[in-house]
Amino acid sequence: MQRPCVTQLFVPVDPTRIGQILSNLLDNARRHTPAGGQITIDLAQTPDRAEITVTDTGPGVPSTARDRIFDRLVRLAQARDRDTGGAGLGLSIARGLARAHQGELSCLAHPNGARFQLTLPTHDRAC
Ligand SMILES: Nc1ncnc2c1ncn2[C@@H]1O[C@H](COP(=O)(O)OP(=O)(O)OP(=O)(O)O)[C@@H](O)[C@H]1O
Ligand SMILES: [Mg+2]
C-alpha cells in the first residue's frame, strides 16, 4: 500500500541564532509580565512563511514606540524605572538576526500587553 504524501515544512535557519531571538523575546516578556500574568507562544504557517508570535499580559508597548524599541539602547520609561533592566540592545540584535534570515521581527498592535512576531521564509519539501 502506498504511504500518504505528507509535505514537510522546511525552515532553513541557524538554530542558535533563532534561539537567541526567541530567548530575547521570552526574557522581555518575563521581565514585563507581572506575577499571575500569562505568556503565550503561537505558531502559524502562511503559504510562504512560518510565524512565531509571543504575547504577554504586561503593560504593553505604546503604538508610538512600536518601531523605536528596535533602535539600539532604547528602553521605555517603565523599563528604565526597573532596577534589573537590560541595556536596550536585545530587540535591535534580534531584528538584525531575523533579517539576516530574510525574515522579520515586529511589535504588533495588541489591546492588552505586548505582542511580538517573528516571521521566517519557508520552503515546501516535496515528499
Ligand atoms: N514584552 C514587553 N513589554 C513591554 N515593553 C517591552 C517588552 N519588550 C521590550 N519592551 C521595551 O522595549 C525596550 C527594548 O527592549 P530590548 O530587548 O531591546 O532591551 P532590554 O530588554 O531593555 O535590554 P537587553 O535586551 O539588552 O537586556 C525595553 O527596555 C522595554 O522598554
Ligand atoms: Mg531584552
Image (cartoon, rainbow, N blue to C red):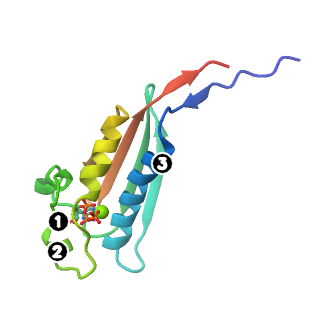
Quick check: 91 left or right of 49? left
Residue marked by disc 3: 16
What secondary structure is found at the residue carrying circle 3? helix
Residue marked by disc 2: 80
The correct choice, above or below, for 8 with respect to 70 in the image is above
Please give the name of the residue rendered at 22% of the width and 80% of the height, measured from the top-left corner: 82
Crowding at dot 2, Cα within 10 Å, few <14 / some 14-19 / many 20+, comes out as: some
Please give the name of the residue rendered at 36% of the width and 58% of the height, measured from the top-left corner: 25
Does the closest atom of ligand 1 sit within 8 Å of the Cβ of label 1? yes
Count of numbered labels shown in the rendering: 3
**Counting residues from the N terminus, which is met first, the one under dot 1 or under dot 3?**
3
Question: Are the residues at dot 2 and dot 1 in contact (C-beta closer than 8 Å)?
Answer: yes
Crowding at dot 1, Cα within 10 Å, few <14 / some 14-19 / many 20+, comes out as: some
Quick check: 57 left or right of 41? left
Residue 86: x percent and y percent? 26, 69
Residue 32: x percent and y percent? 31, 71
Residue 74: x percent and y percent? 15, 61
Residue 92: x percent and y percent? 24, 51
Work out how far the residue at label 2 is from the one at label 3, CA to CA, in angstroms: 29 Å
**Counting residues from the N terminus, which is met first, the one under dot 2 or under dot 3?**
3
Farthest residue, direction left = 64
**Counting residues from the N terminus, which is met first, the one under dot 2 or under dot 1?**
1
Please give the name of the residue rendered at 38% of the width and 39% of the height, measured from the top-left corner: 119
Q: Hey, which quadrant is residue 124 in on the image?
A: top right
The residue nearer to you, when weighing 111 against 35, is: 35
Q: Dividing the image into 4 quarters, which one contains the C terminus?
A: top right
Residue marked by disc 1: 75
Please give the name of the residue rendered at 43% of the width and 47% of the height, measured from the top-left corner: 17
Work out how far the residue at label 2 is from the one at label 1, CA to CA, in angstroms: 6 Å
Quick check: 101 left or right of 95? right
Is residue 73 something one can see in this rendering?
A: yes
Q: Amino acid at mark 2?
A: Arg
